[in-house]
Amino acid sequence: MIQRTLSIVKPDGVRKGVIGQVVSRFEKAGIRIVAMQMRQLNRKDAEGFYAVHSERPFFGELCEFMTSGPVVVMVLEGEDVIALNRELMGATDPKKAAPGTIRADFADSIGENIAHGSDAPETAAVEIAWFFRGLDIVS
Ligand code: CMP
């Protein structure tokens, strides 16, 4: 099934200069990028986006990190792209991520893990709408 998912290159990915390498992995996997923007999140943006994690002990740290520099937010489109993106990223904890995945290759820690990807169709729809209006996405 053709799906869409939200991808974020987090502040550590931008600082390390690996935006291009992350995007390149998506393109090599046949994924289409149908929307893309660079933006600096403020505290409210980060807290709203990660609201499902608000009760977690790492919530404050997560929001601090996500506002520590610009991020690149993308809508990815393709066959089963939600799972494919998660496969390309690897496990949340880079120490557990399979070799050759984005997080295994570029990430330092579970908190600073280079990339975010929606985990299911419902969350993808909510997360895409958080950042993009319909008109901002090409078809
Ligand atoms: P992400 O896929 O963006 O969704 C929630 C994020 O919380 C996750 O990636 C991690 O970067 C972060 N996270 C998860 N567990 C921890 C943790 N134990 N400590 C700090 N951050 C975490």
Image (cartoon, rainbow, N blue to C red):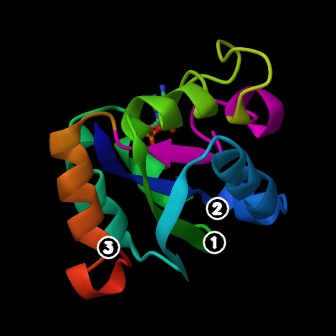
For mark 3, what is the residue? 131
For mark 1, what is the residue? 69
- Residue 92 at x, y = what percent? 53, 26
| Of the pair 121 and 13, the residue shown nearer to us | 121
| Of the pair 19 and 134, the residue shown nearer to us | 134
Q: Is residue 115 magenta?
A: yes
Q: Residue at x 21, y 68 (%)?
A: 129
Amino acid type indicated by mark 3:
Phe
- Say which quadrant the N terminus sits in: top left
Which disc, if any, is residue 139?
none
Q: Nearer the viewer, mark 2 or mark 3?
A: 3
Sequence-first disc among 2 and 3:
2
Q: Is residue 109 magenta?
A: yes
Which disc, if any, is residue 11?
2
What is the magenta range? 103-118
Relative to 101, does residue 20 appear above or below in the rendering? Answer: below
